[in-house]
């Protein structure tokens, strides 16, 4: 068995493979050179893992490509795999998220896009259809654009209930469906939007990323635009877990598949000062569902450090012990093979890292 780390960057997709227990890495690429890869997924539900890449070419536009041979070759449909129907008057700007559904839906893949919309694939991520109920939601016209655009950047299928799925967008907040996408309701109670006249609105929050807990699938974690939160009711109400962190601003939040209650984030100083908190390259870990936090930075750069980590540029694998990974805007990728206790460099001098995903293949 090997560990595969897919690294989406502003100028292509790189693949890092480890066959020695995540001690050393062989990096190949770029695939799709000079193309932004904002979304990557490794679908391990099938006998042969499928890689999915959401690409954004300045010449050809956005698309989704798949590979069934670990990147040796890639397939793109003759027509655009993700496209808005003509009657919507919308044009796809970018695919921000690709998320395989649970094992009981082996051909279902979800795609979150810019502008904020959700698409569903029933053929393993080759072609997609717009989820109309979210697009037609009466709140949609009031969803705004975050600094990086208006996008659905998080899709969280419920592992035990196939009809339940949550999405998060910037800006707009968290929305839920309990009927496989036929209807949607906001779930933002307790999340603050300090930049709005009403700081506790029903919707309109700038949620940066949401993760689901490994042990309790009804427990979610959210990194907000100034705010870190936990929900114990599948994302309907939220409470702050920011105490103990050096800052409550940042983009990624990641739960560890094999450790219930274990979650990681990478705090930045502030929305107006998007450098790492304290100018240090430090990942922060909680082992008690956000009740307390500790820095885990052994092996990371010690000096002043300025690059940020974007919302999808941190991930974890399902190894034992768990592996944690992140990439920076200056092109470094770091890995921990011991749940954050120590770190090593996977790659350097890559383009701006936009997305990372890891899996055992």
Image (cartoon, helix red, strand yellow):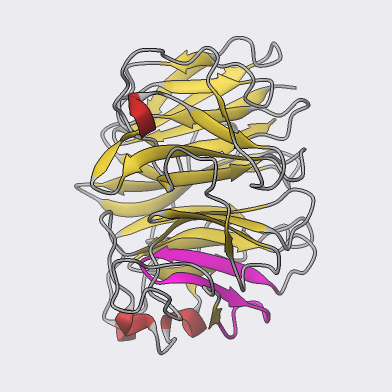
Place of residue 250 in the rendered image (x, y in percent of width and height, measured from the top left): 40, 45
Total numbered labels placed on residues in the image? 0
In this view, 121 is above or below 361: below
In the image shown, does 240 or 16 lie closer to the viewer?
240
Place of residue 117 in the rendered image (x, y in percent of width and height, measured from the top left): 42, 71
Q: Residue furthest bottom?
A: 138
In the image shown, does 210 or 57 lie closer to the viewer?
210
Q: Quadrant of the image for the N terminus?
A: top right
In this view, 99 is above or below 41: below
Which residue appears at 42% of the width and 65% of the height? 169
In the image shown, does 216 or 166 lie closer to the viewer?
216
> Does residue 327 appear left or right of residue 121 in this picture?
left
User: Residue 41, can we see it?
Assistant: no
Query: What range is drawn magenta here?
Result: 164-184
In the image shown, does 268 or 27 lie closer to the viewer?
268
Image quadrant assignment for residue 339: top right
Place of residue 351 in the rendered image (x, y in percent of width and height, measured from the top left): 30, 27
> Does residue 287 appear left or right of residue 202 in this picture?
right
Q: Residue furthest left?
A: 59
> Does residue 76 appear left or right of residue 275 in this picture?
right
Which residue appears at 60% of the width and 39% of the height? 68
Image quadrant assignment for residue 20: top right
Place of residue 297 in the rendered image (x, y in percent of width and height, measured from the top left): 53, 20
Which residue appears at 50% of the width and 77% of the height? 131
In this view, 251 is above or below 26: below
Q: Quadrant of the image for the C terminus?
A: top right
Which residue appears at 39% of the width and 41% of the height? 310
User: Residue 253, can we see it?
Assistant: yes
């Amino acid at each position: 068995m090997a560990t595969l780390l897919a690294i989406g960057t502003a100028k292509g997709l790189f693949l890092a493979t480890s066959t020695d227990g995540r001690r050393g890495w062989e990096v190949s690429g770029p695939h799709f050179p000079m193309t932004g890869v904002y979304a990557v997924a490794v679908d391990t539900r099938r006998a042969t893992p499928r890689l999915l890449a959401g690409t954004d070419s300045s010449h050809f536009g956005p698309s989704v490509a798949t590979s069934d041979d670990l990147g040796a070759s890639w397939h793109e449909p003759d027509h655009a795999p993700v496209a808005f129907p003509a009657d919507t008057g919308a044009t796809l700007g970018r695919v921000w998220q690709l998320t395989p559904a649970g094992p009981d839906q082996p051909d279902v893949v979800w795609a979150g896009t810019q502008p904020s919309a959700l698409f569903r694939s029933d053929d393993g991520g080759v072609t997609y259809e717009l989820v109309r109920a979210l697009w037609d939601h009466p709140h949609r016209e009031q969803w705004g654009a975050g600094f990086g655009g208006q996008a659905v950047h998080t899709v969280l299928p419920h592992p035990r209930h196939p009809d339940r799925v949550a999405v998060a967008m910037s800006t707009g907040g968290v929305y839920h469906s309990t009927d496989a996408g036929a209807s949607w309701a906001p779930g933002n109670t307790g999340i603050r939007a300090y930049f709005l006249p009403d700081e506790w609105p029903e919707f309109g929050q700038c949620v940066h990323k949401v993760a689901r807990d490994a042990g309790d699938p009804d427990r979610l974690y959210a990194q907000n635009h100034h705010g870190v939160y936990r929900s114990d009711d599948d994302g309907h109400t939220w409470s702050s877990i920011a105490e103990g962190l050096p800052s409550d601003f940042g983009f990624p939040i990641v739960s560890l598949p094999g450790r219930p209650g274990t979650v990681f984030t990478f705090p930045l100083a502030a929305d107006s000062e998007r450098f790492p908190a304290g100018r240090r390259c430090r990942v922060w870990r909680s082992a008690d569902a956000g009740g307390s936090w500790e820095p885990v930075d052994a092996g990371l750069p010690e000096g002043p450090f300025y690059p940020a980590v974007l919302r999808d540029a941190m991930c974890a694998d399902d190894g034992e012990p768990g592996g944690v990974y992140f990439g920076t805007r200056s092109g470094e990728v770091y890995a921990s093979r011991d749940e954050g206790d120590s770190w090593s460099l996977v790659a350097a001098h890559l383009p701006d890292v936009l997305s990372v995903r890891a899996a055992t293949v």
